[in-house]
Amino acid sequence: MNNSEKNICSIIIGEDVKFENIPNGLDIDFQIQNNQIIGKINIIKSSEKFLINLSNTIEKKFNLELEITINENSFLELRDESDYKYGTDIIIKSIMSKNSIFEFFRLNNFKNNTKNTFNHNIELALNCEFRDFNFSNGSNEMDNNTTVSLNEENASYVGSGVMISNSTNSNNDLSIKHLSKSAKSDCSFKTVSRGSSNIKFSGKVFVDHGCSKTISNQISKGLVMDESAKISLIPKLEINNDDVICAHGAASGKPDESVIFYLKSRGIAHTDAEKIYVQGFLGEFLDKISNSEMQEKAMKYISTHC
């Protein structure tokens, strides 16, 4: 979908909150109360497609509580491409009504001496699709938690996370709950751990009784670049129905030295050869991003940080 087909607007959060180009059909309310940002986004006109750019310019810790409501047959694309210099505490609750689509892109830069937390709980109704993509360079302490509840038939989740870090003590938890039949989920997580980084990913897929025709795929991979770096990948499946297709996989290790050697034998310096290898590793799942503009931005993000 081209941006020309969307209503594009912006929410800019600094010492106060500014709105740009807010169209009819989009109800937005943001207020700052005692250093806490309280926000609501409500899609109330189903015939329109909305793109919201969320920007942070605040010169202190970013504390946000956000409620998102997407009504029937609606489309919301939410982008956060902010730099967070002073740490974050973000809590989001989203509710999707039937036949709605929600695309959420986070391409963020964090300072390595900060603490950051992110929690997102989202509920999906009949025929909803949630597309969730997160790219991060990590920070000193980081906790990411996302819970996706596929409450009704044909609800669908697809998402990818990428973390590239030199300094992170990071915990990443993803819980996908299949609570109705014929729901689908497809998630991937990739990380590169350098220095003394310790990165953990726990992905749980739960399939309830009566949830036949479930399809779920989960894969997590990591590259350990230095002796002191650590990666822990923990996939979990809890399946309470036999009529399902569920798969998971996890693998981490050092780069393939034969590939690095091959690149160096072609006259490429070791540092550049390693970067090419890492870019290829992290870019494996970018084709899940159907939005060509954001796929290009994700590739640029990986290239810049690896």
Image: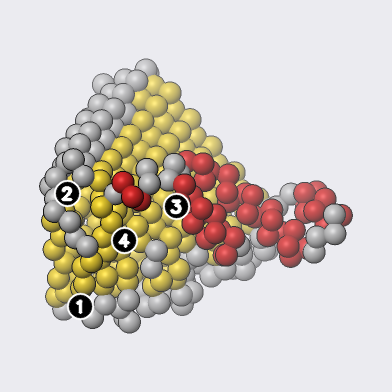
Q: Which residue is mark 2?
A: 43
State the mark number for residue 53.
Answer: 4
Q: Which corner quadrant of the image does residue 128 belong to?
A: top left
Which tag, 1 or 4, sits closer to the chain's start? 1
Q: Label 3 belongs to which residue?
A: 294
Residue at the disc numbered 1: 16
> Can residue 177 be spotted in the picture?
no
- Is label 2 in contact with label 3 (beta carbons under 8 Å)? no
Q: Check disc 3 and give the amino acid type.
A: Met
Number of numbered tags placed on the structure image: 4
Amino acid at circle 1 = Asp
Q: Nearer the viewer, mark 1 or mark 4?
A: 4
Q: Are marks 4 and 2 in contact (CB under 8 Å)?
A: no
Where residue 113 sits: x, y (%)? 46, 77
In this rendering, is residue 116 above or below 238?
Answer: below
Residue in the image at 33% along x and 82% along y: 59
In the image, taking residue 248 as reference, residue 83 lies left or right, namely left
